[in-house]
Image (cartoon, helix red, strand yellow):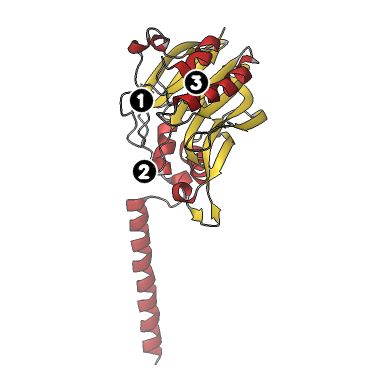
Amino acid sequence: MRLHVEEAGVLGRGAWLIAGAVVVACMILLGPSTPAGAPFARTVPVDAAKDVVPNRVMTWNMCNPCDESNVDRAAEIAAYAPQVVGLQEACVRDVERIRDHLAHLHGLDYHVEYGPVLRNWSRCGGAPWRPGGYGQALLSAAPMTDVVTEEYPDGGSEDRGYIAVTTEVAGQTVRVFNTHLAQRRQEEVRERQTAVLAPQVARYERALVLGDFNAVPDSPELTRMWALAEDTDAGCRPPAAGACEPTTDWQSKFDYVFLRGFSTLGHEVRPSRFSDHHLLHTDVTAR
């Protein structure tokens, strides 16, 4: 009997050793399970920014529904590490995960504020009686204050609005707006929306207006914006708008970083395989 007990003990220890070896092998192949130790998830370029760039701002329509990985979306943002990021077509749950990935995978800490959001189960999931929030979001490395969220009186085919915050960019206090105007072929609606947005922007000597305006530069509905600010792409100001770089997969310029009280030091439009809109980021300096 003693022999059987000892044999059972040896066999038990052997089984545990084998199980442990399997676990170690899996960890080597797959990497740690926690976000903080998952370098395999990094898809950023080798020359990516290592810390937040204090004078860099970005706008990105993430495309929804596109069913993309939030790890990949976070890596796209982390590659350029802007001080401020304006997101459109964003689900609250997705932004929460992106923010976590930015912190845990890339060491980039952001504050977050959400603009007017719809409750949309088909886009953002959740229970049918408690659908997820969908709309705009602002990420900022510096705290955000004086938050204002406003829905446009007429959203067109879908409720739309803007969020405005006070934060810091390039060492300066600045009012930042993030908006998403009505969908294509709704020019008159967009004109009414900019009639609401532009007077709010005009209140500030120093402002940045980010977003998807769903309009090419020489569209009449953008006239009010051009009267107040310049786009980061100098070739986009009408009437020379034909020289501007497209920001969508269908070769249209819809995405803008309007500068008021700032000048651009350079900008970049980067196509992304995770969205039908390109990432647009710019480095700015105060005038």
The answer to which of marks 2 and 1 sits earlier in the sequence is 2
Residue lying farthest to the right in this orientation: 146
Which residue carries the number 3 mark? 56
Location of residue 15 in the rendering, given as x and y in whole percent from the top left corner: 35, 73
Judge whether residue 67 can be spotted in this image. Answer: yes
The answer to which of marks 3 and 1 sits earlier in the sequence is 3
The answer to which of marks 2 and 3 sits earlier in the sequence is 2
Location of residue 240 in the rendering, given as x and y in whole percent from the top left corner: 37, 7
Which residue carries the number 2 mark? 40
Which residue carries the number 1 mark? 270
Q: Nearer the viewer, residue 116 or 105?
A: 116
Labelled pair 2, 1 in contact (Cβ < 8 Å): no
Quadrant location, the C terminus: top right
Q: Nearer the viewer, residue 37 or 231?
A: 231
Q: Nearer the viewer, residue 16 or 37?
A: 37
Residue lying farthest to the front in this orientation: 188
Q: Is residue 31 above or below residue 111?
A: below
Q: Residue at 63% of width from left, 24% of height from top?
A: 167
Report the mark closest to the observer, 2 or 3: 3
Disc 3 packing (10 Å; few <14; some 14–19; many ≥20)? many
Report the mark closest to the observer, 3 or 1: 1
Judge whether residue 82 can be spotted in this image. Answer: no
Q: Is residue 98 above or below residue 186?
A: below
Disc 2 on helix, strand or loop?
Answer: helix
Q: Identity of the amino acid at label 3?
A: Arg
